[in-house]
Image (cartoon, rainbow, N blue to C red):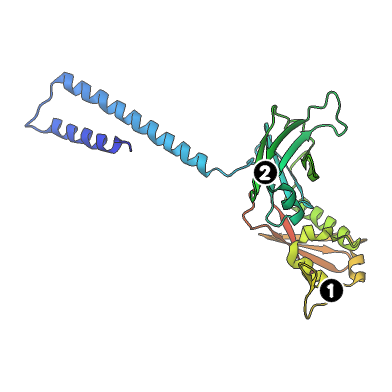
Amino acid sequence: MTRIPELEQELVAAATRRQSPRRVLRPAARVALAVAAVGLVGAVAVLQATERNETERHRAPAGPQGGPSAKVAFDREAGVGFGLEGPVLTVSVHPQAPRKTLNRLSGARIRATCGQGFTGGQGDPRQESTRRWPAGADRLRFRFPRDISPVARWCRLEDPVAGHVAFVRFRGDPLAREVRIRRIATRWAALLAAGDAGYCTYSGQPLCERIECRRAGGVPMENCTPMSAKSRRSFGDATIEDVTIKGNKAMVKFSNGEAIELGKDTTGFEHPVEWWWVTRVVRVR
């Protein structure tokens, strides 16, 4: 434990004694005392700055903070987010990621790769890093030998033995909130109309159960009417007519007379880009 507070008290006491009429210091002693005071102030300042830096270092959230050079993308089907900044790739697994993703990662040696081209070969500056994914971990950093962030167009995660886990392509500029919501709604609608269960990765388990009237494991829900095949197919040719965003909620109206409500993720999932889920289907006319 540091004795800086005690030294400060001693210095104050010495200064008080110096001003007392019963004790007069010689000029040389006063100079020495002044030098000691300056040194002490400097030591206190350095110590406080060090403590502040150490505190901020421990408080800083993991992963890239969305700086000018950061690239961020999501594989929603896998429930995995990628953040590339400098030579460091941060991979985050969302709390609602499919069980298949969690099983593939937990305890396995996972290889992360980022590159510019898609064919490989000479001249492709792709970088790789392999680490064991700790069981139960929801985030892991991979450090590449060189910084590929300025030219990287994609990243993937794979188990060298079991195969593919997640894959993303990076876009040129970060998507505005409305554009991101429109893309989520469009993808959700296309999968639902095609009868593809992948729409559940955009809506989460509660809405998926209400649409199918089946709980996890295929257990039928009582007093529940599943969405008709006609209603599902109507989203196939529907276009988005309006998007309204208020706080953590958004409403997207389709030309088929239906609307969907989306909610911003509030589970504490840390990543520079917002994650939105389809939470409700509403008939508007």
Task: Using the rendered view, name the quadrant where residue 47 is placed.
Answer: top left
**C-alpha span from label 1 to label 2:** 39 Å
Q: What residue type is labelled 1?
A: Pro
Q: What residue type is labelled 2?
A: Trp
Tag 1's secondary structure? loop
Residue 265 place in picture, x, y as percent: 67, 57
The residue located at (16%, 20%) in the rendering is: 27
Label 2 Cα crowd, 10 Å radius (few <14 / some 14-19 / many 20+) = some
Of labels 1 and 2, the one closer to you: 2
The residue located at (63%, 57%) in the rendering is: 267
Could you tell whether 84 is left or right of 49 in the image?
A: right
Q: Which residue lies furthest to the top in this view?
A: 28
Tag 2's secondary structure? loop
Could you tell whether 179 is left or right of 132 in the image?
A: right
Residue 141 place in picture, x, y as percent: 65, 39
Answer yes or no: is residue 98 visible.
no
Residue designated by label 1: 226
Q: Earlier in the sequence, mark 1 or mark 2?
A: 2
Q: Residue furthest bottom?
A: 223
Label 1 Cα crowd, 10 Å radius (few <14 / some 14-19 / many 20+) = few
Could you tell whether 258 is left or right of 4 in the image?
A: right
Toward the viewer: 93 or 8? 93
Residue designated by label 2: 133
Residue 104 place in picture, x, y as percent: 75, 49
Answer yes or no: is residue 204 visible.
yes
Which quadrant, please, contains the N terminus? top left
